[in-house]
Image (cartoon, rainbow, N blue to C red):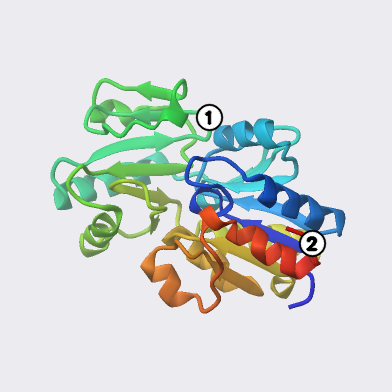
Amino acid sequence: MLRPRLIASDLDGTLLRNDGTLSPRTLRALRTAESAGAEIVLVTARPPRFVDRLADAAGFGGTAVCSNGALVYDIGTRTVVSSRALPLPTAHRVATALAAAVPGIGFALETGNHILYEPAYRLRLSEDTGAELPVPSLADLWLADVPVTKLLAWSDRLDADALLAAAEAGAVDGVQLTHSGGRGLLEISAPGVTKAGTLSVLCAGRGIDAAEVVAFGDMPNDLSVLEWAGAGYAMGNAHPSVLAAIATHTLSNEEDGVADVIERLFGAAR
């Protein structure tokens, strides 16, 4: 592959190490690619607030595709450029179907700035501290007057793969179902919202063809963009379904797999 014009990378399990940090080697590789004229686009399930913290720590600018494609975010100005919200009535309908299929399941609404959760949703992430807003009951969740980027469904009994299978078997339709490896966590977006769909529109606006894009990812929510890009790399630590679907693999996130590819593409030193 010729030097790409755009590098699209997932964050957790891909660009970031397991402790959530960006290694000096990976940061150098990204800077080398930028200096050579390539654009770096973060393509993540994470909301903008997480990207902001990473930007502060690593000096990132540019653009991020957040919430599995529901948002395009300008990191430098900290503004949402475009969004595709999940209608609240649709979220309510899907949650009702999921609750019938998976007893004890809990729900939360991701807005990009906050996460609203009802009592059965007991998943707590340290990075969401300060952004979590509890509501008294499940019924109150559907009264929220907020734009919804994702409906989150969580089970303490099923892992993410089993939860996705249960949702598909329960005839949950009219939405985009996926997961990014979270513990028993299913991520639900508006129909047609994927990382690849949003990235392709962004690239078209820049006059960049899929063949000029190299992408990295590790989880089922990354599959669309890995398959769309001219060169898609599954991380060595990727989900089995990703490793099976994507022919080209790189080293794990702990081994700086993204940096290893970029260094070869741009002739950079380690």
Q: Residues within 10 Å of mark 1 (few under 14, many from 20)?
A: few
Q: Is residue 16 visible?
A: yes
Residue positioned most to the front: 270
Q: Residue beneath label 2, please? A: 268
Front in this rendered view, residue 36 or 170: 36
x 45%, y 61%: residue: 237
Residue 174 located left or right of residue 232 = left
Give the structural element (helix, strand or loop) at label 2: loop
Rendered location of residue 202, percent (x, y): 70, 57
Rendered location of residue 165, percent (x, y): 25, 62
Front in this rendered view, residue 140 or 181: 181
For the C terminus, the image quarter is bottom right
Rendered location of residue 138, percent (x, y): 24, 30
Q: Quadrant of residue 79?
A: top right
Above or below: residue 163 compared with residue 104: below
For the N terminus, the image quarter is bottom right
x 78%, y 60%: residue: 269
Q: Indicate which disc residue 145 carries.
A: none
State how far apart marks 2 and 1 are (Cα). Answer: 37 Å
Q: Amino acid at mark 2?
A: Ala
Residue 56 located left or right of residue 140 = right
x 70%, y 38%: residue: 75
Rendered location of residue 41, percent (x, y): 68, 52
Give the structural element (helix, strand or loop) at label 1: loop
Badges 2 and 1: C-beta atoms under 8 Å apart?
Answer: no
Q: Amino acid at mark 1?
A: Asn
Residue 254 located left or right of residue 265 = left
Q: Indicate which disc residue 113 carries.
A: 1
